Image (tube, helix red, strand yellow):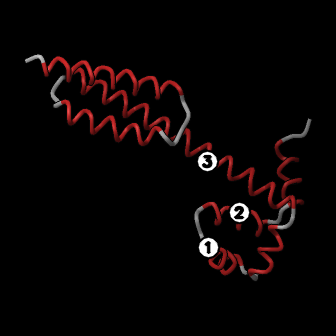
């Protein structure tokens, strides 16, 4: 079994430090021209790297890691937001239209991840809102 240190060394042998830096800059949304200027290579060199299997694999691996971190943070924030929303709903200080706006916002945020718990929580809150609106209509 390979150790983390040996895996890092192997990765460095396959992909250079400049290439790793280029991958990081690309994931930050920098343009190819900006990346090449910052790391001191020609754009032709960058595009040549893109044809190298090890470079593409390293880029894809890092992209997956970064997006997983973003997804995890988003889910964490969304769960906290839904918990807070639930507490606010329990106070019954919001009008149904205000709650509807909040649910719409949180529903849009929910599009960015695929966690069933959050979707179920949204459904539960929407059901509660529906019951609140029907109760309000009877008065």
Residue at image location 56% in from the left, 34% down from the top: 114
Residue count near mark 3 (Cα–Cα under 10 Å), binned few <14, some 14–19, many ≥20 = few
Could you tell me residue 104's position as x and y percent? 34, 38
Q: Quadrant of residue 2?
A: top right
Q: Mark 2 highlights which residue?
A: 23
In the rendered image, which residue does mark 1 sit on?
A: 31
Mark 2 neighbour density, 10 Å: few (under 14) some (14–19) many (20 or more): many
Above or below, 8 relative to 112: below
SS for dot 2: helix
Looking at the image, residue 42 sits to the left or right of residue 111; the answer is right
Marks 3 and 2, the one that precedes in the sequence:
2
- Which of pointers 1 and 2 lies earlier in the amino acid sequence? 2
Q: Nearer the viewer, mark 1 or mark 2?
A: 1
Which quadrant of the structure image shows residue 31? Answer: bottom right
Q: Say whether residue 60 is left or right of residue 105.
A: right
Judged from this view, the residue extending furthest toward the left is 139
Instruction: Give the CA distance from mark 3 to mark 2.
Output: 14 Å
Res 111 label: none
Rendered view: 29 above or below 40: above
Mark 1: secondary structure: loop
The residue that appears at 54% across and 38% down in the rendered structure is 113
Where residue 3 appears, as percent x and y from the top left, is: 86, 40
Of 95 and 16, nearer the camera is: 95
The local secondary structure at tag 3 comes to helix
Q: CA distance from mark 3 to mark 1?
A: 19 Å
Q: Which residue is mark 3?
A: 67
Tell me the CA gap for discs 1 and 2.
Answer: 11 Å
């Amino acid at each position: 079994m390979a150790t983390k240190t040996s895996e890092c060394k192997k990765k460095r042998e396959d992909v250079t430090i400049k290439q790793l830096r280029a991958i990081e800059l690309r994931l930050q949304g920098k343009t190819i021209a900006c990346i090449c200027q910052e790391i001191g290579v020609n754009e032709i060199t960058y595009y040549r790297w893109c044809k190298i299997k090890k470079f593409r694999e390293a880029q894809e691996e890092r992209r997956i890691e970064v997006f997983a971190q973003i997804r995890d943070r988003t889910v964490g924030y969304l769960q906290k937001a839904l918990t807070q929303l639930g507490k606010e709903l329990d106070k019954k200080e919001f009008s149904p239209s205000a709650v509807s706006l909040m649910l719409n916002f949180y529903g849009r945020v929910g599009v960015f991840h695929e966690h069933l718990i959050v979707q179920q929580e949204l459904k539960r809150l929407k059901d509660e809102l529906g019951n609140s609106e029907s109760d309000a209509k009877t008065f």
